Image: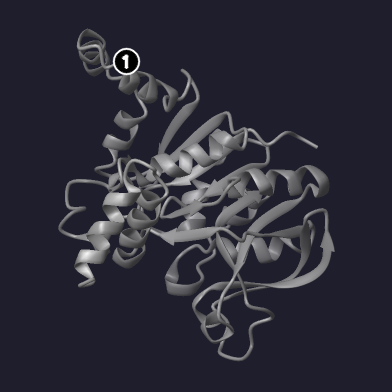
């Protein structure tokens, strides 16, 4: 079994729910406390042992590439001013030379198409897929836990969480089979099932480990829901030949693609910091009229 070394980050979306903020700034570069959303996701991947970070971009996304590059003038200025702590923190977030790659999704044809655009950079290796809108808060990173399941089972791994059964029609839902190696066998998969027809209340939360054979299926360019190339459709076909296992994530997930989730993430991550917690609680209390 090949080692998991690469991760794909689809960052080509327009971020229309955050206009006008995202008119000139990619939604992935909006900050949660003091880091861009995309930095949280890349850090999660790095903590899981990922060595190669592949970004599928679109127009007006060059700032993401700049963010993960060395800014010589900034580093020199910080060094000259004795800002050694800030400089060290920036350098700790910096990928090593050759660890980042960028490719363009020229047309907005869905998540499946974005993943397919990374095929040449991934090659014939298993890869992680992390949706950058979803950032997670837990003692151990979600992808790190998924890698442990992957090392035991191989195949394909999906991170899932439980939702209210009445809300299952809003998500991609999997069926739960036997427990295996810190995860469970996935025996069904449905994208936004009709009310009352979901095989469980476990929904896919934006973290995947997939085998490279998915690219062949995505390459057929079959259109699904909304006229887009759907990743779920390709995974359903891949289930006929390969195993799929679920990892039940029990931390907190914030959908930073929505204003509500973005605000919630800022509060949660600020409260996690000892230098901000007391002030944030005071502000929250004041806003609530306490």
| Of 131 and 36, the residue lying toward us | 36
In the depicted view, which residue is nearer to us: 147 or 118?
Answer: 147
Residue corresponding to mark 1: 84
Residue 163: name its quadrant.
bottom right
The quarter of the displayed image where residue 238 is located: bottom right
Looking at the image, which residue is at 32% across and 37% down? 64
Return the x and y of residue 232 as percentages of the image width and height. 59, 65
Say whether residue 144 is left or right of residue 183: left
Residue appearing at x 27%, y 19% in the figure: 71
In the image, what residue occupies the spot 62% across and 42% down? Answer: 127
Decide: few, some or many residues near mark 1? Use Cα within 10 Å; few <14, some 14-19, many ≥20.
few
SS category of the residue bearing label 1: helix
Tell me the quadrant of the picture where the C terminus can be found.
bottom left
Q: Position of residue 267 (x, y in %)?
A: 34, 57
Up the image or down, 105 lies above or below 62; here it is: below
Which is more toward the observer, 198 or 33? 33
Using the rendered view, name the quadrant where residue 14 is placed: bottom left
Residue sitting farthest toward the bottom: 196
Is residue 153 in view? Answer: yes
In this view, 245 is above or below 97? below
Q: Does 166 appear above or below 111?
A: below
State the residue in front, 239 or 247.
247
Q: Position of residue 50 (x, y in %)?
A: 59, 33
Position in image of residue 75 (x %, y %):
27, 15
Q: Residue, x 80% and y 70% (percent of image)? A: 177
* Protein image colouring: one colour
The quadrant of the picture occupied by the N terminus is top right
């Amino acid at each position: 079994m090949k080692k998991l070394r690469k991760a794909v980050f689809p960052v080509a979306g327009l971020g229309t729910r955050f206009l006008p903020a995202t008119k000139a700034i990619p939604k992935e570069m909006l900050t949660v406390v003091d880091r861009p959303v995309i930095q949280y996701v890349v850090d999660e991947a790095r903590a899981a042992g990922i060595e190669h970070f592949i970004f599928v971009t679109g127009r007006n996304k060059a700032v993401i590439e700049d963010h993960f590059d060395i800014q010589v003038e900034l580093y020199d200025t910080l060094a000259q001013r004795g800002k050694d702590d800030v400089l060290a923190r920036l350098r700790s977030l910096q990928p090593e030379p050759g660890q980042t790659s960028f490719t363009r999704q020229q047309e907005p044809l869905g998540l499946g198409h974005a993943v397919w655009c990374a095929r040449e950079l991934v090659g014939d290796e298993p890869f992680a897929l992390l949706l950058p809108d979803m950032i997670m808060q837990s003692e151990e990173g979600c992808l790190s836990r998924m890698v442990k399941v992957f090392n035991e089972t191989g195949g394909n791994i999906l991170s899932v969480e439980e939702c209210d059964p009445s809300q299952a029609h809003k998500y991609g839902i999997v069926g739960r089979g036997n427990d295996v190696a810190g995860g469970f066998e996935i025996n069904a998969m449905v994208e936004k099932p009709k009310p009352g027809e979901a095989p469980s209340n476990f929904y896919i939360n934006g973290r995947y480990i997939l085998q490279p054979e998915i690219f062949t299926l995505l390459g057929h360019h079959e259109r699904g829901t909304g006229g887009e190339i759907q990743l779920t459709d390709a995974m359903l076909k891949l289930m006929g030949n390969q195993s799929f296992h679920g990892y039940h994530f029990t931390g907190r997930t914030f959908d930073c693609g929505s204003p509500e989730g973005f605000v919630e993430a800022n509060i949660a991550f600020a409260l996690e910091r000892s230098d901000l917690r007391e002030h944030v609680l005071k502000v929250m209390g004041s806003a609530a009229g306490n």
